[in-house]
Image (tube, rainbow, N blue to C red):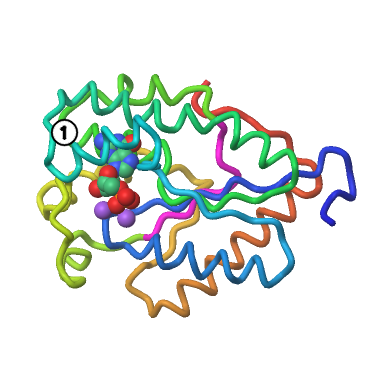
């Protein structure tokens, strides 16, 4: 197994990007690859629509309910908080988590509505910090061309343009950016390389840390 050291752990790998940037299909390719390497790995996504909070979020996203912008922001955050302890125990037990969207989506999507960015970051502080953030970079116009959007609340070009601007604000030099317009196999190859490096560092006992605190 991976437990060469007591403090060996799994990696917290986060994929971010606009809607239709390819995160979901890349996560599943990555999952198969890592499983094939014999690693303990799970694929997660936020929002996790299976919980009570997630149900409220899902109903909002599908336009089956209306919620105040700050209220929905806090629900998305609560949806990450309700998974925090499980996330920590999985990582400590050596399982790598590939997470499709995290706090950066939280901040980028809510700021794009006009909410103050620092107000948006505040409830995310203290969640586990990712070991790796990979941003699948796609121009909003290109994303919109990809077979159209599914019709959920945020899936509109003008809104996605604003989200992309806020991702730019959040992006720091530790993020790995992949051009999501490249062929899927090329994106997959680049992603694997970033992820394998990050997991190796976590296996050597990199301490867990907290986001924005
Ligand atoms: P997905 O299941 O990845 O398609 O996400 C659903 C939609 O919700 C998508 O448009 C991105 C958006 N979203 C994801 N996380 C958050 C969040 O924390 N806050 C807000 N406001 N929107 C989010
Ligand atoms: Na979506
Ligand atoms: Na998505």
Q: Look at the image and say whether residue 130 sits in the magenta stretch.
A: yes
74 to the left or right of 142: right
x%, y% of residue 198? 66, 54
Q: Nearer the viewer, residue 90 or 175?
A: 90
Which residue is at 73% across, 38% downward? 92
Residue in front for this viewpoint, 170 or 32: 32
Q: Residue at the spot x=58%, y=67% of the render?
A: 192
Is label 1 in a helix, a strand or a loop?
Answer: loop
* Residue receiving disc 1: 113
The image shows residue 212 at horizontal and vertical percentages of: 49, 25
Quarter of the image with the N terminus is bottom right
Q: Can you see residue 80?
A: yes
For ligand 1, tell me if the residue under mark 1 lies within 8 Å.
yes
User: Does residue 164 show up?
Assistant: no
Position of residue 207 in the picture relative to residue 24 (left or right): right
How many discs appear? 1
Give x and y (percent) for residue 63.
12, 41
In the rendered view, tell whether residue 110 sits above or below residue 48. above
Residue 193 coordinates in the image, percent (x, y): 61, 67
State whether residue 80 is above or below residue 137: above
Q: Residue at x 81, y 47 (%)?
A: 204
Whether residue 57 is in magenta: the answer is: no
Q: What segment carries the magenta color?
A: 128-136
- Residue beneath the point at 32% across and 72% down: 181
Q: Is residue 173 left or right of residue 148?
A: right
Please name whichever residue, 173 or 42, is drawn nearer the observer in this view of the structure.
42
């Amino acid at each position: 197994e991976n437990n060469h050291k007591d403090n060996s752990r799994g990696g917290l790998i986060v994929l971010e990007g606009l809607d239709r940037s390819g995160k979901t299909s890349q996560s599943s390719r990555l999952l198969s690859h890592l499983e094939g390497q014999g690693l303990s790995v799970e694929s997660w996504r936020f929002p996790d629509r299976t919980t009570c909070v997630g149900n409220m979020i899902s109903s909002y996203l599908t336009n089956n309910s209306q919620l105040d912008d700050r209220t929905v922001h806090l629900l998305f955050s609560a949806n990450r908080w309700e998974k925090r302890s499980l996330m920590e125990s999985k990582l400590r037990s050596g399982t790598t988590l590939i997470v499709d969207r995290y706090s950066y989506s939280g901040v980028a999507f809510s700021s794009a509505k006009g909410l103050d960015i620092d107000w948006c970051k505040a409830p995310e502080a203290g969640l586990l910090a990712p070991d790796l953030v990979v941003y699948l970079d796609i121009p909003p116009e290109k994303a919109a061309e990809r077979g159209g959007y599914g019709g959920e609340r945020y899936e509109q070009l003008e809104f996605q343009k604003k989200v992309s601007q806020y991702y730019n604000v959040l992006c720091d030099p530790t993020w790995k950016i992949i051009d999501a317009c490249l062929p899927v196999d090329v994106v997959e190859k680049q992603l694997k390389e970033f992820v394998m490096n990050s997991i190796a560092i976590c296996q050597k006992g990199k301490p867990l840390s907290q986001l924005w605190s």
